[in-house]
Amino acid sequence: MMDCKKALGECGGDLEKAKEFLRKKGLASADKKAGRVAAEGAVWSYIHAGSRLGVLVEVNCETDFVARGEKFQELVNDMAMQIAACAEVTVVSAADVPAEVLEKEKAIEMEKEDIKSKPEAIRWKIVQGRVDKIAKTMALLEQPYIKDSSKTVAEVIKESIAGIGENIQIRHFERFVLGEGIEVAKADLAADVEAQTKAMQKADAEPKAEEAKAEAKPAVAISPALVKQLRDKSGAGMMDCKKALAECGGDVEAASEFLRKKGLASADKKAGRVAAEGAVGSYIHAGSRLGVLVEVNCETDFVARGEKFRELVNDMAMQIAACADVRYVSAADVPAAVLEKEKAIEMEKEDLKSKPEAIREKIVQGRVDKIAKEMSLLDQQFIKDTNKTVADHIKEQIAGIGENIQVRRFERFVLGEGIEKKAVDFAAEVAAQTGGKL
């Protein structure tokens, strides 16, 4: 109230001018707040319709009270949608663009024909101007705001700081586009037809061999009820269930195991096929302090839209959220430099120094392999059934769904992770605010 009264007094009672006066005053104080530590906030995601594009973003403020507020939550959601809408954006600010990227762009610009004809004295200035422009196109804060293109994202953040009264920072984000960078083989219809013809000829020959086997086995009557029971248990086709029951003498459990082994054997063959369809999924834990973005690929959009595949994507997102040490999809993805560092640490441990030289290397390698598995998603126990690993579960899904399935990549954000918070000295703060007088 007092701020409004003062503003109206400053502006001679003009309401519009007073509003502008307050806005400018707020933005000025926002600059001061921008230097304060912001380690609270929210991790949020945005998945575009069709699950072919997803965003994970962390936006920080100073207190959890503000983080729970409607205005801050709306801002976080807007930033996620903003990132989704900006295909060229890769960093938060222009200052975050790596130096090697800028140097590469500078070298490209210097080789352009229109630059070579310019005087040496101004050539560098022109190139620097172009490179600065490129850096801005890559920076989120420099983009026109999706809800009001007359201002930039940076200006929206500044206005939010002024309105909310705390420092607000977009810390980092990740943007996944389904299948981006995956090379899809061009279809060779003639070769496909030839391969399918051979497969059909082979399939025609197989029943004859099966019939010969069947003659040696005593016939077992397979009731429709047994077939239905096995279908409900395994999800396999009717004829596959009937054949499995015949093979296993009508034993449903044995037939279920027979189908599973047959399916897993075919899963190994499918694992080599290109999977460029699928879905980008996310998981935000209660309180928005932990978030996951994951891309899981399959071969066709038909399977990608199916309930089983959707459930798998959701399970993978929750699995990643539950595994704090996981950094890579598989142990093979752990960088050599990381493994070498771990090896060096293990070699210096006291318990190894007393071991013979001949076996020391083997012990260290075993420990490093174990560390690599701890960092690998596929080697973790599956959260819904700890009797199998994530890799086992995916293999079962390949067998059941009938397509190659791959967890391609993921990102996991923990709110405020790595931000150094200042220790609060309440006595010093009170003294500073009272000018040392109590």
Image (cartoon, rainbow, N blue to C red):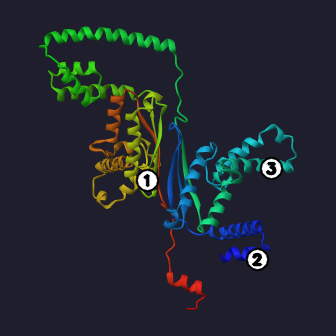
Residue nearest the viewer, comparing 112 with 160: 160
Say which label, 3 or 2, has the lower sequence index: 2
Per the image, the residue denoted by label 1 is: 341
Disc number lying in front (1 or 3): 3
Locate residue 36: give its quadrant: bottom right
Q: Residue at x 67, y 68 (%)?
A: 31
**Callout 2 amino acid:** Gly
Distance between the Cα atoms at labels 2 and 1? Answer: 67 Å
Tell me the residue that label 3 is attached to.
Answer: 124
The image quadrant that residue 84 belongs to is top right
Q: Earlier in the sequence, mark 1 or mark 3?
A: 3
Q: Amino acid at mark 3?
A: Trp
Q: Is residue 11 above or below residue 76?
A: below
Residue lying furthest left in this view?
A: 218
Q: Quadrant of the C terminus?
A: bottom right
Residue depicted at x 44% and y 32%:
305
